[in-house]
Image: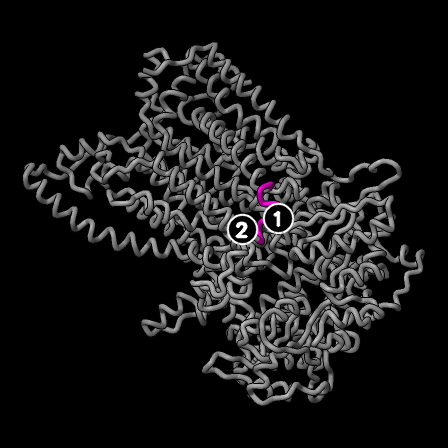
Amino acid sequence: MHRFALFRRMPGYKRREAFEGYLFIMPWLVGLIAFVIGPIVASFYLSFTDYEIVRSPTFVGLRNFNQLINDRLFWQALRVSTIYVFVSVPLGLILSFAVALLMNQNVALIGLWRTVYYIPTLVPVIASTMLWLWIFNPEFGLLNMLLAQIGIKGPLWLGHSQWALPSLIIMSLWTVGAPMLIYLAGLQGIPTDLYEAADIDGAGSWAKFRNVTIPMMTPVIFFNLVINMIGAFQVFVQPFIMTQGGPRYATLFYVLYLYQNAFQYFRMGYASALAWVLFAIILILTALIFRSSALWVYYEGEVRRR
Amino acid sequence: MQTYLGTRRRWAVVGLWLVGLLILSACVAAPAPAADGGSAPAGDGVVEIRLASYGLGDAWNSNLERTIDGFREANPNIKVKVEFRPGDAYWDKLQTEFAAGTAPDITINQMDWVIPGAARGMFVDLMPFIERDQVDLSAYFYDMAPEWGWRGGLYGGLLYAGGQALYINKDLLAAAGLEMPAADWTWNDMLNYALQLTDADSGQWGLYISPLNPPYWGASFIHGAGGSVLNADRTQCTLTTPEAQAGLQFISDLIFVHRVMPSPVTLVGQENPFLTGKVAMYFGGTWQEGQIREAGFDWDFAHMPAHPETGIRSVQMGSNAWSILSTSTKREEAWQLVKYLMGEGGQTGMMSNGIPGLTAVVESEAFRALHQPQDINVVTSDFANFGHDYYPTPDAGEWWNAVGQELSAIWSGEATVAEATERACAAVDEIFARRPAEWNR
Amino acid sequence: MSTPSATGRVTYSSAPLSQRRWFASKRRRAILHKLIVYPILLAGAVVMMIPLVWLVSSSFKDSGRIFVFPPEWIPNPWRPENYLAVLDAIPFMRFLGNTVFVTALALVGQVISSSLVAFGFARLSFPGRDVLFLILLATIMIPYQVTLIPTFILFRMLGWLDTFAPLIVPYWLGGGAFFIFLLRQFFMRLPLDLDDAGRIDGASTFGIYRHIILPQSRPALGVVAVFSFLNHWNDFFNPLIFLSSVDNYTLALGINLFRGYQVTQWNLLMAASVMISVPCILLYAVAQRYFIQGIVFTGVKQ
């Protein structure tokens, strides 16, 4: 009621803009109501049930959430994913930004370079994971052969509980193609007159990078940060194919454990509870990033400015 | 310069987009001729049933179709639709379909699915049908009950048997001046062979065991030493008993003391070294015979060695089955097909892809000829005399995983056998503590 | 959720140099620049190319030779007939047709609908906008594993199982919060003066979207199109769950028929993977030059 009253009190042009705003987001709203909300609400309900998929769910109240607190593997999975997110996301963001800058240079055959650097993202996952199994092989793998050249006996990588997670983090850095491409598109969108103005002021490369490129790129950095954080919490395919969570649960990523509960251990209700806990964690982190964005993200077209 | 759309035309564009969307959804939803769940009878009393399987290569797929053709000819009133699906996420999809009521009538089934599904009412008990139709279970050398039985019911009909087999590279044996081992050889003899067949300089190993962790081939060494993975009631982990630990210690010593076997962690992502001629004796699966036959060296089957003191020999066996889903509304027709597949027609038809369970077929010249010049009866007689099941329980997937996670620390040198088995049993017992009361017999 | 207010204009600190000295140092720096950039580029390129080279090489090998360590980069024996075997083993052309159909329709829908929605979120203000945007983001924070079964049941009730509808229609309805968020970020970078100028010229809101914001956002739209194409082209999971007749299979799903439980026909899988991914690579190589123009670091367009 309150909202409608507010709507009516708006000046005419504002009311029209609001109406048009709803019109523009209408496709998403329809899709949300038709395909998305229902399953999400269902999974929320299922988190309070004992649901074996092949039998009807039975309501158990908060039992799944109580069980979760005492579940050693839940804490292990949370630990693995948290380490992965806090290490691989910042490293990945820096590396992909560096590659994007490199791809934005005035060099010969730039189209070819850009394609080559995107190839890891284009190769089917099954092929690239099989290849990484070779790279990490302790006896014949590329990494340990290189380390042997400089007189170091390499570790067991995926076969050792101390090294398995670092191995998967190293592997994640190699597919920087997607954030790189987004950065590259962002670099394209920086108005050239800003650089020209900087040239006239006699700014050096570093000053231009620091004072033009970085501020103009903050909305894109912000996007990559949020999306990669969410994505890193949901990593599933690589540990599923390469390690099945081992050795000794060292690569038991959160969503891998969730998947095992859902489809291998007949505990879909428990898996739903896991999903909603993860949701809460991601939501809080996202909210923190959004709050902090006031301090460091610069929008040229900030609508609130009006 | 640009021209901007007016208010009315703006509406027209949005309207057009919506109309396009409606037409589009109607169009893409239209090509829906294929079966959507339980399809209706195809008329004239003809009933269609759907059988789903993961594809196992063209030869396998076409062989299954050919085998089922025999059923189609004999049963013109039953139409069989075979759906081949990727092995990836097969089980996930089947559960999803089951929940939505669109599952096929019959599915291929395996050790880690049968009992977990059966205990939750996912599959149909075949025992009443077997008793009604007087199917003679004593005609099978392969006992189905330990693998697919639950509470007196039977939840799968045999597709084919399989399990552990010991393959020997005869070329490497000859190069070391060794004869094929005798049928009554022991672990000590095997170790002697392995020591003579290992050549670290050329990267040649005496033996290799894969997959290693119980319920796979490591379990047969635990059994040989007089131990077990679980107790007889399947309610408790017994890996911490001295016998079980001795069996695992034997394998650990093969890797770290005698250095005749590569650690599984050093072979991550690599082609099976037996296939590349780098391993002389290989404890593998019967399903690898085809690949080994094409590997281009002379080889043979050997009997499982016996433990020198206990005298026990043990081989792990696990089979594939056909199960009827309890959502099927055409159980009678589905049973007719399962009966055919587990009977002579199916066992003979599929014998080029696995080991038939019917004694008459296993001993037939036609089956033995498929494996010549090797003698498949070396494998099947070990199955019949010393076979052990995979310890299937309703929570098999979960505790198998826990055992594998903890024991893998032995093979990477991170934990002793005692430490790893302590942790494995703690994890398994924790899983068993969550069982509903009705699962503990 | 809060959106930040604009910070001040950027400032420059360096003192101006004389024109001549500036040019001289620029040339010197350009050479130095090349000496640094090319070796880095080349080293990185080698690392990036390894998987593709390995994939292509594997596709010409015998099944048993693929995982031999260390890898044999030159296949021996040479087995080009793997490619013919792929065409024999699966109805490749049929799968290709299905894939093209699904990818094209989903891609068009996704680009149109996500840009419309993103425009609404980025450039218009309306009550509840920030809450709705948070909801949009929240929908990608829930792992799909737990919404899969309800979604499957929903599509069954709609009668959409084993049709292409679940693979297309949601993408016409804003499906892809990722893309909406991406475009919103890019739209928000454009100065509001653009909209104001448009309005003074008498443009409608739709006109501003169509004739001002979209043309200014070509690189971002290009990224959306590329990602959308790759997502739908390579999607294995959704077709796996929602399709059941082999006749309706897409390529990414179809080639997985080479993977059974204990047996994988690796040589055929690799050959089929090459047949699927090489068109993607070529398409990307061609497409990228349309949405990414070269800009040198000084900001002068090539």
Tell whether label 1 touches label 2 (CB within 8 Å): yes
- Amino acid type at mark 1: Ile
Residue B204: give x, y in percent of width and height.
Answer: 51, 80
Which residue was labeled with disc 2?
Answer: C272
Q: Is residue B59 above or below residue A5?
A: below
Residue B340: give x, y in percent of width and height.
Answer: 84, 56
Q: CA distance from mark 2 to mark 1?
A: 10 Å
The residue drawn where x is 48% and y is 78% is: B203
Decide whether residue C92 is among the magenta residues: yes
Direction from residue C220 to residue B432 in the image, left or right: right
Disc on the earlier residue, 2 or 1: 1
Task: Estimate how packed mark 1 is, as few (under 14), some (14 to 19) or many (20 or more) residues with alpha carbons within 10 Å.
Answer: some
Nearer to me, A78 or B310: B310
Decide whether residue B212 is among the magenta residues: no
Q: Is residue C147 above or below residue B185?
A: above
Residue B150: quadrant of the picture: bottom right
Nearer to me, B428 or A183: A183
Direction from residue C212 to residue B77 in the image, left or right: right
The magenta region covers C85-94
Task: Estimate how packed mark 2 is, as few (under 14), some (14 to 19) or many (20 or more) residues with alpha carbons within 10 Å.
Answer: many
Nearer to me, B263 or C14: B263
Which residue was labeled with disc 1?
Answer: C90
Q: Is residue B296 above or below residue A177?
A: below
The residue drawn where x is 41% and y is 41% is: C284
Give the quarter of the figure containing the C terminus of chain B: bottom right
